[in-house]
Amino acid sequence: MYESTRGNLADQRAAQAITLGMVPSGGLFVPSIIPTLNWQNLQGLTYHDVAKRVMTPYLPDFSEAAIAKIVNVYADGTFDGPDPAPLVLVGNFGVLELWHGPTAAFKDMALQVLPDLLKVSLKLFNRTEEVLILVATSGDTGKAALEGFKNREGMHIVVFYPEGGVSPVQERQMTTTEGENTHVVAVKGNFDECQTAVKRIFASDTLKEQLQAKHLIFSSANSINWGRLLPQIVYYFWAYLQAVEQGKVTPGGKINVVIPTGNFGNLQAAYYAKRMGLPIDRIISASNKNNVLVDFFETGVYQSQRDFFQTISPSMDILISSNFERFLYEMSGRDARKIQTWYDSKNQGTFTVDPVTLKQCQDTVYAGWADEEETLETIARAYQAYQYVFDPHTAVAMKVYEDYLSATNDQTFTVIASTASPFKFASNVLRGLEGEKLKSMRDEWEALDYLSQLTGWKIPLGLQGLEDKVTTTATACEPGEITGLLQKLFIG
Ligand SMILES: *Cc1c(COP(=O)(O)O)cnc(C)c1O
């Protein structure tokens, strides 16, 4: 069963949590009981069988056949190789490459699964409405969600991205999506403003009623939706199994994981894996210059009212980290009253947790950050040392891992979650690799080719030929105009 982080809803089935996306009166769905799973029983299984075993205890209302079908996407060629999430040994640490899906970012790991999770959830509820998926994106979620939901019967998707706040490749990926049921909107504002506007729409009863009259219900493909987090728990088990198989960790020995963090979904998934019994020791959170979480772990004060920086790791340019609410729920000993107090809108995104909760947070997660210069420098250094090309998000994680190592000298085998292919951010990766030497590029497409020439790495299939594809223009709008736009599109 699932309950709300704010204590305003309990005993909900998985299908309900996934259909609704978030608790209608505020709060996020969390599993009431975190199941345990012995990793040893997963040894020798394929990724999709591991996925089945990890996800099943969280989906008691789903049939075995339905779950098998949902995770089949990991075995049917959607991901570019036999292993959807290979653990690559780089130096003496592992890089878990989570970007072998159709859009070359780790969001595919969950967003290729979510549409089917949602479809089954609706059926379990005998809901006959069509679903309207609203997505706020800092770049990668948008395209991954569009790919997952395009041409899905009974589903419509509208993606909102901050105008000028995503990379040229990300923008082109979104505006070249085919599909009758997809809409892309460029919002004049930053990601937090996009996300806040979308959350407000979820809470708007007027719009909900108007949509209901058209036989439509809202859901979310952002990581506030439990259906997004669940498939992400799987790859931490997979990483561990591979580390054992590759002889990097003795069976039962612990590993550390380092995670480039934005909305805290990926990290929260690692936390659930650990709670399920996976031998994870330190969970290391890496932020860019938008280091609101690093400050929190130091002081216990979450202060989202601060300057927002647009960086070369745009998917981490987030100050209001949605899933942190789920984390604090666990860290506070599931004290829904505290969560409600901290997240009360009158605090305007600023709150201070009690010392006991803070201690729990600090014991669970180590947090660090890297600025842009350090990130570029890390891309260059890692390439020289290991001939491995990090994208700017994963490079932030690499730098934070190095800092962690110098601070602790912890020799535990460590897995860095690699969240994007370097080709998604080719010009900035090249800036890192070549520095001053870099010749000027005609456009981003030349940068992709040049990065491939320079490193011998292949451009992922999903990023090939983007420059020649037909684009649709994104609709532009102010955050305040989103409701009106949705009314025009879906209510008429
Ligand atoms: C979404 C994203 C992140 C942040 O992940 P969260 O789960 O939101 O913390 C990091 N890197 C890349 C490339 C992403 O697309």
Image (cartoon, grey):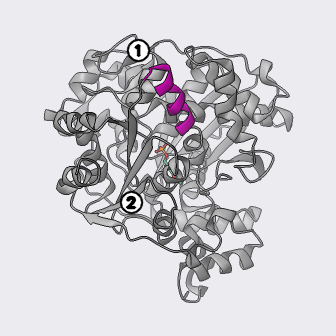
Q: Position of residue 322 (x, y in %)?
A: 37, 38
**Residue 377 is inside the magenta segment:** no
Q: Is residue 411 left or right of residue 156?
A: right
Residue visible at 78% across and 51% down in the picture: 81
Local packing at callout 1 (Cα closer than 10 Å; few below 14, some 14-19, many 20+) is some
Q: Position of residue 255 (x, y in %)?
A: 69, 32
Q: Position of residue 329 (x, y in %)?
A: 38, 22
Cα separation, mark 1 vs mark 2, equals 32 Å
Residue visible at 48% across and 51% down in the picture: 141
Q: Which residue is mark 1?
A: 12
Q: Position of residue 130 (x, y in %)?
A: 40, 37
Please tell me in which quadrant of the rendered image residue 425 appears: bottom right
**Residue type at numbered disc 1:** Gln
**Residue type at numbered disc 2:** Val
Judged from the image, the secondary structure of the residue bearing numbered disc 2 is strand
Q: Which mark is residue 344?
A: none
Residue visible at 58% across and 79% down in the picture: 468
Observer able to see residue 279: no
Please tell me in which quadrant of the rendered image residue 39 appears: top right
- Residues in magenta, as a range: 114-126
Residue visible at 18% across and 39% down in the picture: 348
Judged from the image, the secondary structure of the residue bearing numbered disc 1 is loop
Local packing at callout 2 (Cα closer than 10 Å; few below 14, some 14-19, many 20+) is many
Q: Which residue is mark 2?
A: 184
Query: Is the CB of the residue bearing disc 1 within 8 angstroms of ligand 1?
Result: no
Main SS, magenta residues: helix
Among the two numbered marks 1 and 2 on one chain, the one whose residue lies closer to the N terminus: 1
Q: Residue furthest left?
A: 346
Q: Nearer the viewer, residue 446 or 427?
A: 446
Query: Is the CB of the residue bearing disc 2 within 8 angstroms of ligand 1?
Result: no
